[in-house]
Image (tube, grey):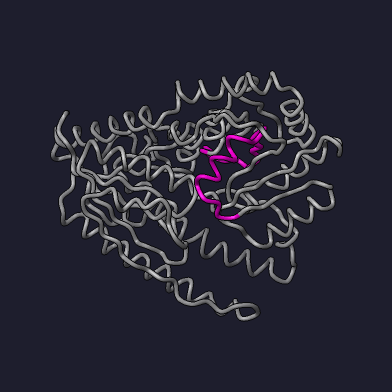
Amino acid sequence: MSDRLRIAVYYNVGWGGGRRWLYECVSRLAKLHDVDLYSIDRNSIGVQHPDVNELGQHAEIVTFSDLPRFPGVLRPLNVPLVWIDLWRFAQASRVVADRIDARKYDVLFASIGGYTEAPMVLRHTKTLSAYYCHEPMRNVYEPKVRRPYNSNSLTTLPRRLWNRAYWGGLIRRWDRQGTRGASLVIANSKYTADYANRAYAVSPEVNYPGVDVEAFRPAERPRERFVLMVGELVSSKGVDWAVRAIATIPAGHRPPIVLVCNRVYAPERHYVETIAKDCGVELIIRERVPDAEVKRLFQTASAMLYTPHLEPFGLVALEAMASGTPVVAVREAGPIETVVDGETGFLCERDPQQLGDAVLRLMDDELLRARMSKAGREHVMAHWTWERSVERLDGLLRALVERHRADPGMSAKEGIGGIAAGG
């Protein structure tokens, strides 16, 4: 199939790796196909960057604002407001699905949905669809990382009942319906594909994201003695593990941690800053850092320290390697598929001493750091470019449409890699 497809792209994702993935995918798909963009713009998630809407021939943005919330001791009064917002968002999703169906696209390509991980649009649309699953809805399927600020016995039971009714009930059901409503499910890693199979009984195809190797590249700048972390400051990112790892390094050799955040949860910030102070670790937290400065930090850090809990993929590890920065990561989930242990960095057990020892080796051994820096860049250039990623994505979308055209009687929900056998 060599003709251009008419593709509707639906998204609802703000800052972070998901937004960068979206921009890179759509910018390249738009060169190959006729792409229109659809989104429900939740003002509550803030300014979205980069601007994906500039890439489409046609864009329809449904504006949506959460109802005002009560602060402080009045927060329990927000419960009905949350349910009302969820219902309003579901209705807006139906409107968007109807608009997409009315324009008769060859395929709908959908990513992160808003209240649910899988877009609610997929529950309603009749258009052939491919859903790119960055991760299953983890707060539904995984226990929360324990924190002292969540251990108040007076609030534990109400919170548990709320989670069971909201997240474990309607949200879980709608997320599952959205995922299984797609004609094709695409996962960003083998780990995510296996996870989605267990959670939703679907059989995803794997399409790894890529890295902008021109934006993230080594520079003729001296390496500085600090460890870089990039991501949200929330409990699942495991910043406390990184702090404790650096604390195992003797004080005279202990590098500071520079943490670049696109979102900060205030209780988690207080928690990790308290640990850092108690451990004697210098933790520098920088929020909403401009792109140019982020890239400079990637180029000048001595190492990237990556300690999230079961991160399904983790684009920042690849961006670090593309920049010539070795990665020290936990040996679990996504990093196992991206970091080549002993060549582009180190994979360690979730143990502060192991992580700290690996960081210290990179700090003290300039030849090792240079070798891993070179290997990391070469690894990304060989296996993790956006051109390679979108070529694979394009092939998956074309195969889905071609099969549907060859069998017009096939339901739009009967694609390739969709519902697993017996699911």
Question: Relative to residue 134, is residue 412 drawn left or right?
Answer: left
Residue 34 spot, x, y in % from top left:
19, 43
Q: Nearer the viewer, residue 348 or 23?
A: 23
Residue 313 falls inside the magenta stretch = yes
Residue 144 spot, x, y in % from top left:
64, 53
Residue 347 spot, x, y in % from top left:
66, 28
Res. 209 image quadrant: top left
The answer, for residue 412, to whether it is visible in the render is: no
Q: Quadrant of the C terminus?
A: top left
Residue in view at x 35 percent, y 40 percent = 25
Residue in view at x 54 percent, y 28 percent = 337
Q: Is residue 150 above or below residue 319?
A: below
Q: Is residue 219 above or below residue 237?
A: above
Question: Relative to residue 82, is residue 423 drawn left or right?
Answer: left
Res. 390 image quadrant: top left
Q: Quadrant of the N terminus?
A: top left
Residue in view at x 64 percent, y 31 percent = 222
Q: Nearer the viewer, residue 18 or 97?
A: 18
Residue 42 spot, x, y in % from top left:
41, 64
Q: Nearer the viewer, residue 123 or 250?
A: 250
Question: Relative to residue 403, is residue 352 drawn left or right?
Answer: right
Residue 309 falls inside the magenta stretch = yes
Q: Is residue 238 above or below residue 28?
A: below
Q: Which residues are magenta?
A: 287-315
The answer, for residue 257, to whether it is visible in the render is: yes
Question: Relative to residue 301, is residue 361 drawn left or right?
Answer: right
Residue in view at x 76 percent, y 39 percent = 255
